[in-house]
Image (cartoon, rainbow, N blue to C red):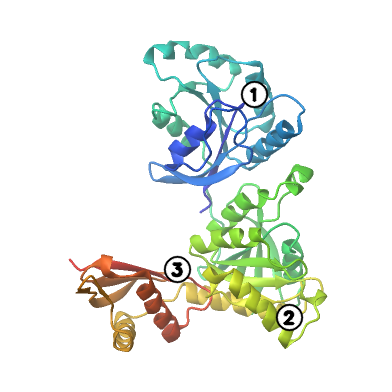
Amino acid sequence: MRKSVVAIVGRPNVGKSTIFNRLVGERISIVEDTPGVTRDRIYAEAEWLTTTFNLIDTGGIDVGDEPLLVQMRQQAEVAIDEADVIIFLLNGREGITAADEEVAKLLYKSNKPVVIGVNKMDNPEMRQEIYEFYSLGFGEPFPISGSHGLGLGDLLDEVVGYFPKEEEAEMPDDTIYFSLIGRPNVGKSSLVNSMLHEDRVIVSEMEGTTRDAVDTHLRKDDQDFVIIDTAGMRKRGKVYETTEKYSVLRALKAIERSDVVLVLLDAETGIREQDKKIAGYAHDAGRAVIIVVNKWDTIDSGDKTMKEFEKKVRAHFQFLDYAPIVFLSAKTQKRLHTLIPAIRTASENHAKRIQTNVLNDVIMDALAMNPTPTVKGRRLKVLYATQVAVKPPSFVVFVNDPDLMHFTYKRFLENRIRDAFGFIGTPIKIFARRRQ
């Protein structure tokens, strides 16, 4: 299911980054007592009472036409567009300012649920001054203290209550959900269009679980697929085009609902740092991954050229060494026929389950090939292993002491499992546990 999105907005220096860090439990945003320090939207996952959601920290919205302030305002507007619920943060010590009223006007136009948090209310005696914030017209204001963590529970109870209720579309149980992610202009929309216009494909549009996207049902070779929309960047086009980070939240939304994620690269422009960052989200989420090199028709193709490009991809995406690489052209449909089989294989491996006795035969053979290491005079003893989950395949290896399991030996076991069972296209998770 898609995680809801919460944006924290407000004028500069009201404590947005402090609240953000408090909610996600890490010092991700830069906190400094200088207005305008947070210039870009920052994303992280937060949780409240078993409900997880994506949280956006924004640059402060301020009046003025200086280039930096204009960019910060645009960033905040993009965050508001993406959000399901907005936390409007104000400074309780300063009351309502003209800049706060400007932010309020922007929020009125959004038609999104708005929850007011009045920050810096550290002293209980100050809470009687909360009533002036009712005049903004967003309902009950919540007195909070970001530095001390006071009042955040009541605020989050209100926020979570506005989260949209998800209704999954009815599809066959074996339907494969896949999405396309990548930086702007790598050809995501073109590839989707090429896949849908191919012969012997049944295409229909259906309401997805996201409120603002339409998933596409595709049936090919007796298999149902759902293409998850990530290209719906229609609002504020120029703002999105000038903001590379816009793709992050769209990618996160799509990844959460995918079985397989296609990471698109542009053969013309080559590999960029942003490509690796975006691919990292799919890997961290444990989804099956296929690297798709698009616009291959623009390259002087040949086996040698393809192998050289593949070496570059492997060097840059070492964390995706399990992901197959598909070269194609969405424009000319060259090699497009290789994509659907790769998606099916990756999805099957992502859901693959191995019998415990067969798994342990492989583990014992691996131990015989490469005995466990000795750490400070103590040797790691691997007792047995079992698969505990799929999507991604996850294994627990019971040992005498998990601290003796070095990451290099864990990597060795993963390689032996891959050699025995394939698992092309999917990450594998291995956990060391002490046998009780």
Q: In this view, does 14 lie to the left or right of 393?
A: right
Residue 267, x across and y down, in percent? 74, 71
* 248 versus 55 height, above or below: below
Distance from Cα at disc 1 to Cα at disc 2:
52 Å
Q: Residues within 10 Å of mark 1 (few under 14, many from 20)?
A: some
Earlier sequence position, callout 2 versus callout 3 = 2
Assess disc 2: are there few (<14), some (14-19) or many (≥20) residues with their C-alpha within 10 Å of its C-alpha.
Answer: some
Above or below 335: residue 135: above
Determine whether the residue tagged by mark 1 lies in a helix, strand or loop.
helix
List the single residue furthest toward the left: 436
Q: Where is residue 191 in the image (x, y as percent from the top left)?
A: 73, 67
According to the picture, the residue beneath numbered tag 3 turns out to be: 392
Residue 8: x %, y % from top left = 56, 34
Choose between 65 and 44: the one closer to the eye. Answer: 65
Q: Residue at x 62, y 47 (%)?
A: 211
Q: Residue at x 66, y 56 (%)?
A: 230
Query: Which is nearer the N-term, disc 1 or disc 2?
Result: 1
137 versus 9 height, above or below: above
Q: Can residue 76 be seen in this view?
A: yes
Quarter of the picture containing the C terminus is bottom left
For disc 2, the marked residue is 335
**From mark 1 to mark 3, how far is it between C-alphas?**
44 Å
Residue ID at (50%, 17%): 92
Residue type (three-letter) at the residue carrying disc 1 = Ala
Q: What residue type is labelled 3?
A: Pro
Q: Earlier in the sequence, mark 1 or mark 3?
A: 1
- Total tally of numbered discs in the picture: 3
Contact (Cβ within 8 Å) of mark 1 with mark 2: no
Circles 2 and 3 in contact, beta carbons < 8 Å: no
Residue 169, position as x, y percentages in the image: 57, 57
Q: Nearer the viewer, residue 138 or 290?
A: 290
The residue pinned by badge 1 equals 104
